[in-house]
């Protein structure tokens, strides 16, 4: 007998049977109980109901007394996967079980199964019915004090590890029993093997850590495994890059994996030619003499910040508000790390010889010392403004105070050029990157140009 329950625009086909009393029951298949150790049992069943996404989960009821009301049976709530364990069982006792399936968007109690009973005798009774053929390899190894990695190989491909899964939240010095199942449209079929693992570090490198981190390198250190003499160690690492480029667009991409093999007597290694301010994910594994698979231990680290990325040159836009010049400012790429602040450096040009001076020759310390009064003739480079990492798109030269620096009035007859200096404060000190020089300009030239092109309108608003 079938029943369809309508929830909004979705239909859930719930299969059940009607018992002699006329009540609807949840029909499950292959209900099984298997002892995994002296006081713990594995409970599993196959759920024939489709559209598992509509299920909220299951409630397992169990008791040693069938006559007790269901309300005082011990309950275990679990998700949509029909498997759980119960602890503190009594050997030789008969236990009675019922399962209730719960649905989303339903306030009524879910369908309840018939009673199943098992006597807790020993671990010899298989719990798998029609088992799949044996795995070629099934092993598990602790990879930390709270995680276990399980891997297996299938018979048709015995030289390749077919699947790996890592269990987190395990308890140190605790033994776990593990079985593998193949899931298909016809249900869940278990492989006949089981393996056990005690959460004790024995076959993986011990105490991995990262030291001496710089912008382009880091040193890996570890101790040898307790119960495995490796033929060699294998290091593999990849990375994720996430930053804002010079156009203000977030870039996100992964770097390809790199693998390195090093001698068994080494317990440290320096990774070089890395990218600044990048998250690296490093795996270190000890490979045994027979070259069989062993899990890796993982450490994560981010390289130090590097010098600011490249910039475009500033653009001289035109005259604004009388004798002031509007410029369009570039932004540095943050590929090597976030920018702390920017300086806008203005250079009065007195002769052509100065055009050959690279911007790096103007030291920040000297520029900070170049402070001028309003009535002085400014004939040396100076800082006109300091911006936070949010540098404005447009800026007006010749008016105001910005970031504690006087934005001096420009001399109408002098020629100028300027550049933007991006600054990063790191553990190695200040790291800077300069934009290319702007074109040469003067207020007089711009006014003459504007007077001969009166149809042009400057309309880019300044942030200030």
Image (spheres, helix red, strand yellow):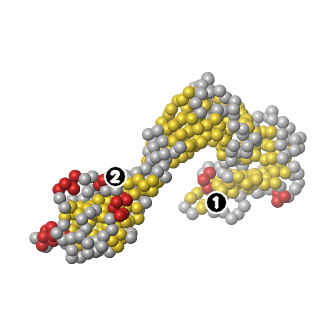
Q: Nearer the viewer, residue 38 or 99?
A: 38
Instruction: Provide the residue designation for mark 2.
Output: 310
Q: Residue 104 shows which numbered tag? A: 1
Pick whichever of labels 1 and 2 is earlier in the sequence. 1
- Residue 190 vs residue 120: left or right? left
| Percent of width and height locating residue 356 | 22, 52
* Element class at badge 1: loop
Q: Is residue 96 above or below residue 313?
A: above
Per the image, label 2 sits on a secondary structure element best described as loop
Q: Is residue 185 above or below residue 400?
A: above
Compared to 168, does 196 lie above or below? above
Residue at the location (21% across, 68% down)? Answer: 318
Where residue 112 sits, quadrant-wise, is bottom right
Quarter location, residue 171: top right
Q: In this view of the protein, can residue 302 be seen by the observer?
A: yes
Q: Nearer the viewer, residue 179 or 450?
A: 450
On-image quarter of the C terminus: bottom left
Is 214 placed left or right of 79 in the picture?
A: left
Q: Residue furthest left?
A: 452
């Amino acid at each position: 007998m079938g029943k369809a329950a309508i929830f909004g625009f979705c239909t859930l086909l719930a299969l059940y049977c009607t018992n002699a009393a006329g009540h609807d029951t949840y029909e499950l298949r292959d209900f099984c109980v298997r002892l995994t150790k002296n006081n713990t049992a594995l409970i599993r069943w196959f759920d024939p109901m489709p559209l598992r996404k509509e299920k909220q989960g299951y409630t397992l009821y169990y008791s040693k007394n069938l006559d007790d009301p269901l309300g005082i049976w011990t309950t275990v709530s679990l998700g949509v996967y029909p498997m759980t364990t119960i602890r503190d069982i009594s050997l030789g006792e008969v236990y009675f079980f019922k399962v209730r399936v719960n649905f989303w968007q339903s306030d009524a109690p879910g369908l309840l199964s018939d009673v199943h009973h098992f006597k807790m005798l020993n671990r010899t009774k298989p719990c798998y019915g029609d088992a799949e053929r044996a795995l070629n390899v099934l092993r598990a190894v602790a990879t930390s004090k709270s995680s276990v990695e399980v891997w297996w190989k299938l018979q048709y491909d015995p030289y390749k590890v077919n699947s790996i899964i890592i269990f987190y939240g395990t308890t140190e010095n605790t033994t776990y029993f593990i079985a593998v199942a193949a899931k298909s449209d016809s249900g869940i079929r278990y492989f006949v093997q089981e393996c056990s693992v005690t959460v004790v570090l024995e076959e993986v490198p011990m105490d991995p850590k990262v030291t001496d981190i710089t912008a382009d390198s880091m040193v890996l250190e570890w101790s040898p495994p307790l119960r495995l003499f490796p033929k060699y160690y294998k290091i593999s690492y990849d990375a994720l890059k996430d930053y804002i480029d010079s156009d203000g667009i977030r870039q996100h991409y992964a770097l390809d994996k790199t693998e390195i093999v090093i001698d068994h007597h080494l317990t440290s290694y320096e990774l070089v030619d890395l990218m600044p301010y990048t998250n690296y994910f490093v795996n270190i594994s000890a490979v045994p003499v027979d070259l069989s698979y062993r899990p890796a231990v993982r450490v994560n680290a981010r390289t130090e910040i590097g010098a600011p990325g490249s910039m475009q040159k500033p653009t001289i836009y035109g005259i604004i508000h009388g004798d002031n010049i509007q410029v369009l400012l570039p932004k540095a790429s943050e590929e090597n790390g976030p920018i702390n602040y920017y300086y806008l450096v203005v250079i009065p040009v007195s002769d052509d010889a100065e055009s050959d001076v690279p911007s790096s020759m103007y030291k920040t310390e000297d520029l900070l010392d170049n402070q001028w009064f309003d009535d002085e003739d400014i004939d040396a480079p100076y800082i006109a403004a300091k911006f936070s990492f949010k540098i404005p798109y447009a800026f007006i030269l010749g008016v105001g105070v910005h970031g504690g620096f006087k934005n001096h009035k420009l001399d109408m007859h002098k020629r100028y050029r300027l550049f933007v200096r991006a600054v990063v404060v790191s553990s190695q000190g200040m790291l800077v990157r300069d934009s290319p020089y702007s074109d040469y300009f003067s207020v007089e030239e711009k006014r003459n140009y504007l007077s001969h092109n009166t149809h042009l309108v400057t309309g880019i608003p300044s942030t200030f």
